[in-house]
Each structure stands twice: as structure tokens, then as C-alpha cells.
Image: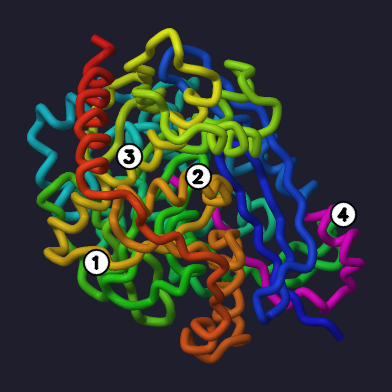
Amino acid sequence: MQRYLLSLDQGTTSSRAILFTLEGSIVASSQYEFDQHYPAAGYVEHDPDEILISQLRAVQDVLLTADVQAGEVVAIGVTNQRETTIVWDRKTGRPVYPAIVWQCRRTAPLCEKLIEQGLEQHVRDVTGLRIDAYFSATKLRYILDHIENGQARAKRGELMFGTVDTWLIYNLTGEHVTDYSNASRTMLFDIHKLCYDPVLLQTLNIPECILPTPLPSAHIYGRVKVGAEGLEPLWGVPVSGDAGDQQAALFGQACFYGGQAKCTYGTGSFLMMNTGDTPIKSEHSLLSTIAWGVGDKVEYALEGSIFNAGSSIKWLRDEMKMIDEAHQIDELAATVDNANGAYFVSAFTGLGAPHWDMYARGALVGLTRDVSRAHVCRAVLEGIAYQVYDLAKTMEKDCQRPLTVLKVDGGASVSDVMMQFQADMLGIPVNRPRCVESTAIGAAFLAGLGVGCYKDIGEIIKLWKSEQIFMPAMNDGEREKRLYGWTRAIERAKHWEE
């Protein structure tokens, strides 16, 4: 009998299911995009039901394509867009409000009030985060304030909160759980004590009874409910891996030791470095977060986030109509040697680390009459790489050590143009793995660990393979000239919203 690991990779713009062998080879995959809702400037919402339906459709496709039989899938791993906030009714299981997406900036005023109350240092010390609309806490508070009798219902235990992993696991197994990595992104979780912080719960008036139980990232959370329609081959299969998408990618890239780093180029772009069993308190506006928990051991990471990366390519395709398919951006960008003086700052929903400007907005600057469509495509790709450069240099300051190599993954990492430019800007090799689905395979490996398919991480390290290494080829003078222009461009995007 075949033995497979199934990964549910629920992202910001699409839901994917990927079936892996225990050796990490992809057997089958399926993906469905779902609608993005923008009810006001800086607001981003999803339909929780559409998230669930698209994810289950992808799972059903994979089961049919691979002709999976009962007993062949030994474990399921879940990985997800983090911070996105869902609240549902405990009795009916129905959502009571749209999912407020991690990119959404609607709670920026509440964040400002918390800062005025002097909570910033407490939040940094306890959660490793900073006060920002990015995280789940203020989104949850907003939902409770904007549904009928929200606070009273929460106190009575009638409501349940979860990030997307919790929502999926609940619908698969009936259990109300999360893992340490996702809990650490709520701005409610003490990353040292591994519990919710009473001060923050009291300040935001959030009853603990609506929060999911936090557990290690490799753990049997529950089993797929018998009778789940369309999932017959999975009935009784344990869901035994769970991690936020960036932590799962770090795991999938086999960055198991302090100092190893990866960057994921997805809807957003996320640079993350394993810092071992000790969190590093950033002095330069990065985040300390839990990477994962395996057994009784917790690993930490230092992270910088770019809110809009691959979403810029989607914007170029869907709103600007400059390309018909995402891969065309690379083809067009490759026809020119540079962006012809144009710079693109993808601050559609503000800037993350190291700038942390909730009121920044996107900008395309340096235009002249001879800037072509190809130049704009290249500027979009280069703009992502510039922001990763800013993160990398900031991370080096916090860690007091230089990055020597960067592992990359995510959908946009297939762009050879961007990966070469990234190597040129950083001045270090950029290593792209054979399987760029690092997020999905990380969740699968965690699930395998959770049920004993692998005895330790040493077995997983042997499965990681490189596909291409991009070596820096730009001279120092040209690099400094480009970076000077980038610094000017990003300053023009800051503080745009008043």
C-alpha cells in the first residue's frame, strides 16, 4: 500500500492541496483562487465559507487524481495565511462576520490608542511583536464590536475565534485548536510561557473562552470526521501538522539551525531566520516569533514582512491588464536590462518591516516618456527585491552576523529575473530548491513527524534538494546607485494617507 502525506496550503489568494510521498515528491496538486473583497480603502476581507469550500475542492481533486484509497494518507498537515481573523458561532459553526485579512488596515486607529496607553513595550516583551493592524488581536476586537451583542455572546462562550488553520481543523475534526506558531501571531500570546497573556486579554476585553487551545506544531489535533462528504479516503486520518505559512516554509527549507534563513515570495514576502531556542529581541523593528514546536522543544525565529509582493504581480495582471498570465511578467522583464529609472513601491496596504508605516501607499516613480510596459514589469519585480534587501540588512544588524546565503521559495520565486536581481542586491548566493512549494512540504513534514513517519529532523534534512543557485554579478558601484534611487522612491510612498 502507498503511504502519502496530504498538505492543505491555504493562502491569501488561493487554496491548494498537495499530496506528497514520504520522500517529499509531489504526487498530485490542485489549486483554486477565491474572491478578494475590498469594502473600503485599506480594507481587505474574505468569505470564510469560500475559503473552506475552495480548500475542500482542492482536496477532493487531489484524492481523485491520485486515486487515493482508504489508509493510504497517513497524516494531514495544515498551513495557512496567518493573522487573518475568523469568528463563528459555536452552536451552528457558521461565521458571524467576514474574515478580516492580515493585510487589512481598518484597525489602525485602535492600534494608535493602544500605543497611546503605553502598551507598546509590553507587547514587544511578551509577544515579540509590535502593535500593528497586521495582527489578529485588534481584528478580533473589531468583529466583536461590529456584530449584534458580540461582547455578550463572546463572554457566554457562544462564539469561537480562530486564524485560518483553526477554522480548517475545526471543520475537519470538530476540535478548536491552533499551534504555537499561529498563536504567536495573534498579539495575544506569550511566546515565552506559551499561553495567552492576561494583560492583553483584559486590555482588549477578549474572553479567553473563545480562543483556540495552543499546541505544538507536530501533534495529533484530531481526526477527520467520519461522514465528511467527499473526503471518504480521509475519514479517521489524523491532522497532525500545523504551522503558519512562513514558519512552515522555514521548516520545509530545512532551516533547522540558528542563523539559517529563507525568504518566501508569495502574496506578501517574508524573510525569516531561525534563532534557535532563544528569541532575539529586535532593536530594528523586526519581529520575534515562534517558528514551531516539536515535542517539548520550541524554536524561535526573527522575521520581517512585506505586505505586498506577489500581489503586485496580480495587480499588474488583473487591474492594470499589462499581462494576461503571471509568468508573462518575467518574460517581459527579461527583454530589458533595467527598469529605465522607474521604481515601484508595493505599499498598497502600508509598509511592513523595517518601515512599519500603516499609512504608506503604493507608488510608481521615476517615469519618463520612454518607460515601456517591459520596464514597468521589471520595476515591479525589482521593487519586491529591494524590500527584501531592506529586511536582510536590518536582520543582519539584529543578529550581528551577515547572511551568507538565502534560501528562497514561493510562487514568485520562479522568476529568474527577480532571483538574479535579488542576488545582485544582496551580494550573496540565492538558493532556490527543487520543490519551491516549501510551505506545503513543511506542513507535510510536520504532519509526518506528528505520527512518527520520521524519527527526527535529520531524516528531513536529507530530503532537501537545490534546483538553482543565483550568484551575484553586479558591481558595487551599480548596486549603490540602484539602492540610492530605491531609498528616494520609498520615502515618497510613506505617510501618504492622512
The residue type indicated by label 1 comes to Lys
Q: Position of residue 358 (x, y in %)?
A: 28, 25
Q: Which residue is mark 1?
A: 193
Is residue 249 visible in this depiction of the protein?
yes
Q: Which residue is mark 2?
A: 417
Sooner in the amino-acid sequence: mark 3 or mark 1:
1
Distance between the Cα atoms at labels 4 and 3? 45 Å
Sooner in the amino-acid sequence: mark 4 or mark 3:
4
Q: Closest to the observer: 474 or 263?
A: 474
Q: Position of residue 374 (x, y in %)?
A: 54, 25
The residue type indicated by label 2 comes to Val
Instruction: Judge from the rendering whether residue 306 lies leftward or rightward of residue 159; answer left or right.
Output: left
Q: Position of residue 164 (x, y in %)?
A: 54, 46
Q: Which residue is mark 4?
A: 230
Q: Are marks 3 and 1 in contact (CB under 8 Å)?
A: no
Q: Is residue 330 above or below residue 79?
A: above
Q: Are marks 2 and 3 in contact (CB under 8 Å)?
A: no
Sooner in the amino-acid sequence: mark 4 or mark 2:
4
Q: Secondary structure at mark 2?
A: helix
Q: Which residue is at a point 55% across and 39% down the rendered structure image? A: 12
- The disc placed on residue 76 is none
Q: Which residue is mark 3?
A: 386
Distance between the Cα atoms at labels 1 and 2? 44 Å
Q: Secondary structure at mark 3?
A: helix
Instruction: Judge from the rendering whether residue 236 lies leftward or rightward of residue 83; answer left or right.
Output: right
Residue 387: quadrant of the picture: top left
Q: Is residue 85 above or below residue 466?
A: above
Instruction: Judge from the rendering whether residue 213 lies leftward or rightward of residue 260; answer left or right.
Output: right
Q: Residues in magenta?
A: 59-82
Q: Are marks 4 and 3 in contact (CB under 8 Å)?
A: no
Q: Secondary structure at mark 4?
A: loop
Q: Closest to the observer: 392 or 369?
A: 369
